[in-house]
Amino acid sequence: MEDVLKSQSNFKDKGRSNCSLLLFGDGDGGGGPHREMLERLTRMEDFDGLPKVTLSTCEKFYQHLRNEESSDLLMTWSGELYLELHNGTYTNMAENKLYNR
């Protein structure tokens, strides 16, 4: 739950959008979520005091953003993505990095 609250306080598009994307799962290798993670998400879907949480796909999330009136006000990123928690990591998936850029 602490990660959800931290992501809310770090949300850079406050005032521009009412939704954000929280990716979760086991590690960086695409292991997907554990059963406990999914159960926690179900409990948090309508929990007083927490942001509204909905399990969905990235595609549905971005479609929702495109349909928002304020979508033209959202922040954008140009260039290489820098993830401060992954500083100094390498990948053998150069093609993925190319598409991310």
Image (cartoon, rainbow, N blue to C red):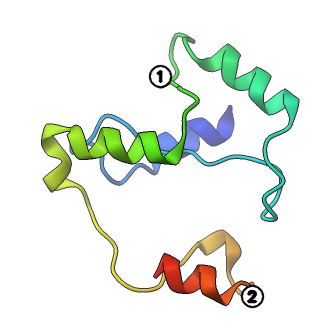
In the displayed structure image, the side of residue 95 where residue 21 appears, left or right: left
Q: Position of residue 28 (x, y in %)?
A: 78, 64
Identify the residue under disc 1: 52
Give the secondary structure at mark 1. Answer: loop
The numbered disc on residue 21 is: none
Q: Position of residue 80 (x, y in %)?
A: 47, 85
Figure check: 33 above or below 53: below
Q: Position of residue 44 (x, y in %)?
A: 63, 19
Instruction: Bin the neighbour count of mark 2 within 10 Å (Cα to Cα): few under 14, some 14-19, many 20 and up.
Output: few
Numbered circles on residues, count: 2
Asked whether residue 28 appears in the rendered view, the answer is yes
Give the secondary structure at mark 2. Answer: loop
The quadrant the N terminus occupies is top right
Q: Position of residue 83 (x, y in %)?
A: 58, 73
Name the residue nearer the viewer: 67 or 77. 67
Q: Residue at x 79, y 47 (%)?
A: 32
N-terminal of the pair, mark 1 or mark 2, is 1
Asked whether residue 81 appears in the rendered view, the answer is no
Q: Residue at x 37, y 37 (%)?
A: 19
Instruction: Bin the neighbour count of mark 1 within 10 Å (Cα to Cα): few under 14, some 14-19, many 20 and up.
Output: few
Identify the residue under disc 2: 90
For the residues labelled 1 and 2, the Cα–Cα distance comes to: 34 Å
**Quarter-wise, where is residue 89 in the image?**
bottom right
**Quarter-wise, where is residue 70 in the image?**
top left
* Type of amino acid under label 1: Lys
In the displayed structure image, the side of residue 36 where residue 59 appears, left or right: left
